[in-house]
Amino acid sequence: MQVRLLATAATCLIALLGAAELAPAAAQTRTTLDIYVVDVEGGNATLFVSPSGESVLIDTGNFAPEAAVRDADRIAAAAKDARLTQIDHLITTHWHGDHFGGMAEVAKRIPIREYIDHGPNIQPAAAFDEFFAKTYPALYGAAKHRVVKPGDAVTVAGLDWRIVTAAGAVQKTSLPGGGAANAACASFKPQDPDPTENAQSVGSIVTFGKFRVAHLGDLTWNKEFELMCPNNPIGTIDLFVVSHHGLGVSNSPALVHGLRPRVAIVNNGTRKGAVPATMKTLFSSPGIEDVWQIHFSQLSGQEYTVPGMFIANAADEPLTAMPVQPIAAPPPGPNAPPPPAHNGPAYWIKVSAQPDGTFTVTNARNGFAKTYGTNGRGTN
């Protein structure tokens, strides 16, 4: 009898120890699609983590050596917060330095299993020659590499990830919920043709249950028209990761008002993006509830900005006076004055979405969070 009792006790102890070992794994179970819009100082880096734990990183920040290290560290911090041990898919939207610049540094910090792009760079630059000749082939040669086109999918368990733009081509076959005439096309006025890499951007529509998000890289104005007019192949979305940092050569009403996002997040810099024309388009979009920004933009001033609780980052040295009127963007070139410095702590904006369409947006700087329910009304 004593032996039997000892055996029973041992069995119970083993079961308890086994449960204790499994508890951390059980705690890792996800129920949400988590999206981190990472501050890369006017570049782009957006990390998606599905409930299955699979990940997609869109873009890797800036190219200059110091900036690449800084931005890779910030992306790695988001990956750590998401409890990732690898990046399953890296989508590079296009070959501008503020979108692919941190790639090699990111790969030093966390393994990348698949590299996705639109194909060769159509806008050669001497500063990037070595990257395309040696660095990039070495990176994807140790993993997988895929060139995508509209209509392709990125396989992520639990998500429907569709490519809708790439290499200057756009989606014309309607996605579920798309295909209706787009009334916002009637007032469209074309801009000058864009021969740059921006128009080649890889654009994604991601669906998680009833929640939908659009990320179109730096897709520009006329390509937006090709995508969205006369019929809207996408339908409506919940979240718009605003194109091209909120610059006015993108984000036409034909796109934004056609998509009718409930929430928009602008990944801008202190003196890059979030310009008045784009902010007006966002604020006037049918059904918009809130706009969030990675930085306060001097280009939008007080007139076209959002409340501070919706802004993730500030300059290291606060401005002596808050500009009420937007300032003019300085002309590009080597003599352009640098933007206000921000090399201290960087904060992301995080979105956590439920399959019923409910989602919460959180500002990591101040902890302010707002939940957007299925009834279309947000709550703090």
Image (cartoon, rainbow, N blue to C red):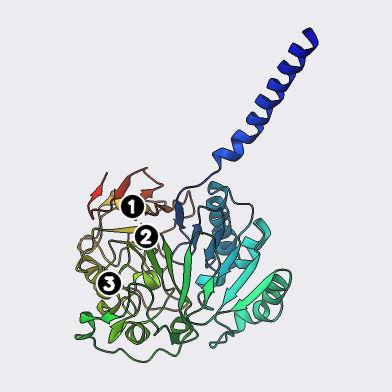
Please tell me how crowded label 2 is: few (under 14), some (14-19), or many (20+) other residues with Cα within 10 Å.
some
For residue 28, which numbered disc appears in the image? none
Q: Quadrant of the C terminus?
A: top left
Tag nearer the camera, 3 or 2: 2
Question: Which residue is found at the position 47% from the left and 66% from the top?
Answer: 160
Q: Is residue 295 visible?
A: no
Q: In the rendered image, which residue does mark 1 sit on? A: 358
Residue 300: image location, x then y, percent: 27, 66
In the picture of the structure, the residue carrying the numbered disc 3 is 278
Q: From this viewpoint, is residue 157 visible?
A: yes
Confirm or deny contact between disc 2 and disc 1 (CB under 8 A): yes
In the image, 175: left or right of 261?
right
Dot 2 amino acid type: Phe
Q: Secondary structure at mark 1?
A: loop
Q: How far apart are labels 2 and 1 at the CA level?
A: 7 Å
> Mark 2 or mark 1: which comes first in sequence?
2
Q: Which mark is residue 211?
A: 2
User: Which of the two discs, 1 and 3, sits closer to the camera?
Assistant: 1
Q: Position of residue 74 (x, y in %)?
A: 53, 55
**For residue 60, above or below residue 307:** below
The crowd level at tag 3 (other Cα within 10 Å; few <14, some 14-19, many 20+) is: many
Q: Earlier in the sequence, mark 3 or mark 2?
A: 2
Q: Amino acid at mark 3?
A: Thr
Query: Which SS class for mark 2?
Result: strand
